[in-house]
């Protein structure tokens, strides 16, 4: 008798749904924290010439072809830190979970936060412990420290700033977690380009700190390139579970090209920060909403009926993220990606009609 997939797949996997990505065809896409700006025409032509020289018939350099050193130079990664490359930061989360999944090992993260922490704990067989934030999405440090003392986690994930809520926790709070944690602390800085602080200056000097980032939010989401910096001892172990050719030749070449033109992307990030402030001020004029502070390229707000407003915006050609139902603290919350000035104006106009 041939067994079915449901009979062979682990019950905890069979019992969940795949990560959902909404179809954005024909819609103003403000649901995934992407940079709204296409590559300038002159750079597109130059990139095309660059990629035409890539030997796609050969396997990629498993060590990144010099890309690690270029990332260190571009983003002021300390000389003491080693760098690991991932197919997006998603893969780095997977590598960490796989490497640490000893029997009884615990992954600890905040709730609500990036769902892939919890999902990777499930995939790799780690025990998962979630520590709720305060109602205003600030860090409940006493509860977090108590959970660390109780569960002695192999790894703690801190999203800094936090997705999907927006605020950045206080630096001294993160340092307190580093001091208390018996294992690895991963500070996920996916939104660092829009934030006021970074712990990258400590990478390589704190024995249990790994700082993780991605190029996705800078305007390179299609490349799928993440990187992590930390002590060589940790990177050498994680490298053992990394697929040998995880960063393809086109991504390596395009990323090196982008780093040569990093000023273009950083100028775009500054524009998005300015637009974020404009959105925050405008959204707070809608008295029916609670708007949370953000250090990322998105804004989370609570409305009387998130499902109704989400559907209404979609019907009017705008796709945002409905967070309602994903966690009790996100009751009736929506997340809006900061877009171009024109896109943000369109969203504000639509909300003005809705709340009129």
Image: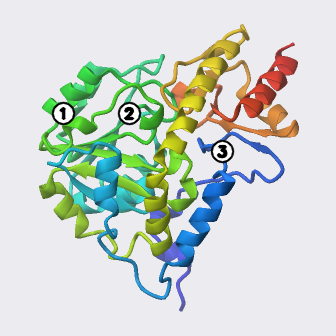
Is 238 positioned to the left or the right of 93 in the image? left
Give yes or no for contact between labels 1 and 3 (Cβ–Cβ under 8 Å): no
* Residue that carries the numbered disc 3 in the rendered image: 37
Image position of 341 with respect to 127: above or below: above
Image quadrant for the C terminus? Answer: top right
Front-most of residues 160 and 154: 160
Asked if 135 appears above or below 227 in the picture, the reply is: above
**Which one is in front in this view, the residue at disc 3 or the one at disc 2?**
3
Spatial CA span between label 3 and label 2: 24 Å
SS for dot 2: loop
Crowd around label 1: few <14 · some 14–19 · many ≥20 (10 Å): many
Give the residue drawn at x 50%, y 83%: 56
* Residue contact between numbered discs 3 and 2, judged by CB atoms under 8 Å: no
Q: Secondary structure at mark 3?
A: loop
Q: Position of residue 165 (x, y in %)?
A: 51, 28
Please give the name of the residue rendered at 72% of the width and 18% of the height, measured from the top-left corner. 304
- Can residue 25 be spotted in the picture? yes
- The quadrant holding residue 196 is top left
Classify mark 2: residues with Cα within 10 Å, few (<14), some (14-19) or many (20+). Answer: many
Cβ atoms under marks 1 and 2 closer than 8 Å: no
The residue to which callout 2 is attached is 160
Q: Position of residue 101 (x, y in %)?
A: 25, 59
Q: Is residue 195 left or right of residue 341?
A: left
Compute the Cα span from label 1 to label 2. Answer: 14 Å
Q: Position of residue 7 (x, y in %)?
A: 50, 75
Q: Position of residue 349 (x, y in %)?
A: 83, 22
Q: Which residue is mark 1?
A: 178
């Amino acid at each position: 008798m041939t067994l079915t997939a449901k009979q062979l797949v682990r019950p905890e996997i069979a019992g969940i749904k795949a990560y959902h990505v909404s179809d954005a065809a024909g819609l103003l896409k403000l649901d995934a924290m992407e940079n709204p700006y296409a590559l300038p025409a002159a750079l597109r032509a130059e990139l095309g010439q660059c990629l035409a020289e890539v030997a796609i018939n050969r396997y990629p350099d498993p060590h990144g072809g010099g890309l690690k050193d270029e990332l260190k130079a571009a983003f002021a990664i300390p000389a003491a830190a080693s760098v690991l490359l991932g197919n997006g930061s998603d893969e780095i989360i997977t590598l960490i979970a796989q490497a640490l999944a000893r029997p009884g090992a615990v992954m600890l993260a905040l709730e609500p936060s990036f769902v892939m922490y919890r999902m990777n704990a499930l995939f790799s067989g780690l025990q998962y412990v979630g520590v709720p934030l305060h109602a205003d999405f600030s860090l409940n440090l006493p509860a977090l420290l108590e959970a660390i003392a109780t569960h002695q986690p192999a790894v703690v994930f801190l999203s800094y700033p936090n997705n999907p809520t927006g605020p950045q926790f206080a630096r001294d709070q993160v340092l307190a977690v580093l001091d208390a944690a018996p294992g690895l602390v991963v500070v996920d800085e996916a939104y660092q380009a829009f934030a006021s602080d970074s712990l990258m200056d400590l990478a390589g000097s704190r024995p249990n700190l790994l700082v993780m980032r991605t190029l996705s939010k800078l305007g390179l989401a299609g490349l799928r390139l993440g990187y992590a910096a930390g002590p060589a001892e940790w990177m050498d172990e994680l490298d053992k579970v990394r697929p040998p050719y995880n960063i393809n030749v086109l991504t390596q070449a395009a990323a090196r090209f982008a780093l040569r033109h990093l000023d273009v992307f950083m100028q775009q990030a500054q524009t998005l920060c300015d637009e974020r402030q404009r959105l925050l001020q405008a959204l707070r004029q809608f008295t029916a909403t609670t708007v949370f502070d953000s250090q990322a390229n998105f804004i989370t707000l609570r409305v009387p009926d998130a499902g109704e407003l989400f559907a209404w915006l979609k019907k009017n050609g705008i796709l945002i993220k409905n967070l309602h139902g994903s966690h009790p603290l996100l009751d009736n919350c929506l997340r809006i990606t900061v877009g171009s000035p024109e896109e943000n104006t369109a969203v504000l106009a639509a909300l003005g009609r809705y709340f009129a």
